[in-house]
Image (cartoon, rainbow, N blue to C red):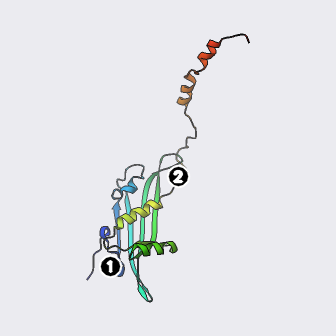
Amino acid sequence: MKKDFVAARLDVKAFAQAGASLSGQDALQDYPRLVAELKGSPAGLHVNWSVLGEARAQAGASEQIWLHLRAQASLPLTCQRCLEAVTVTVEVDRPFHFVADEATAADLDDESEEDVLVLDRAFDLSALIEDELLMALPLVPRHEQCPSEPKLAVADADFEVESEAKVHPFAALARLRGDKPS
């Protein structure tokens, strides 16, 4: 009997024991926290993903449950140099080790390079995909070569004209003082 798995409510243990795989292409607008980082509309943009389950046999212990996630999206972000839109391709390629409870996850997480998560019969794979893509975003997105020269001035010309037009507050005092003999 073949079991159908759904990304929104994934039975991770059964998925891994079956050695199953899933893949999909979701509309970017289905990932609201990722959309909040964009410059512009998410219309027409997608997140491509695939996940592979694996149950690894262990001598003298219960099998280890693993998921291998791959995800990719091209995102319009704000270039921090010129403040124009820059398209950045964000990719994730990571294994995840699943364990029975939080205590075990906390113990193993410190000594393991892989992320250790708690088994869940209704795991939200979409939330994991969104989390991983958010963490893969560049800290400072920017063009290799900006399409327009960045403006490096501290103040603009209108500010300078406005500053020159203002009367100095002590000018009136200087007129009152006049030319008094010392």
How busy is the neighbourhood of tag 2: few (under 14 within 10 Å), some, or many (20 plus)?
some
> Which secondary structure, mark 1?
helix
Q: CA distance from mark 1 to mark 2?
A: 44 Å
In the displayed image of the protein, which residue is found farthest to the right?
182
In percent of width and height, residue 141 lies at 50, 53
In percent of width and height, residue 96 lies at 43, 73
Near-viewer residue (55 or 21) = 55
In the rendered image, which quarter is residue 62 located in? bottom left
Q: Residue at x 53, y 26 (%)?
A: 162
In percent of width and height, residue 61 lies at 42, 86
How busy is the neighbourhood of tag 1: few (under 14 within 10 Å), some, or many (20 plus)?
some
In the displayed image of the protein, which residue is found farthest to the bottom?
60
- Residue 14: which numbered mark, if any? 1
Left or right: 17 as drawn, with respect to 146: left
In percent of width and height, residue 116 lies at 44, 72
Near-viewer residue (100 or 154) = 100
Q: Residue at x 38, y 54 (%)?
A: 35
Residue type beneath disc 2: His
In the rendered structure, are the residues bearing label 1 and label 2 in contact, judged by CB atoms less than 8 Å apart?
no
Disc 2 marks which residue? 143
Residue type beneath disc 1: Ala
Mark closest to the chain's N terminus, 1 or 2: 1
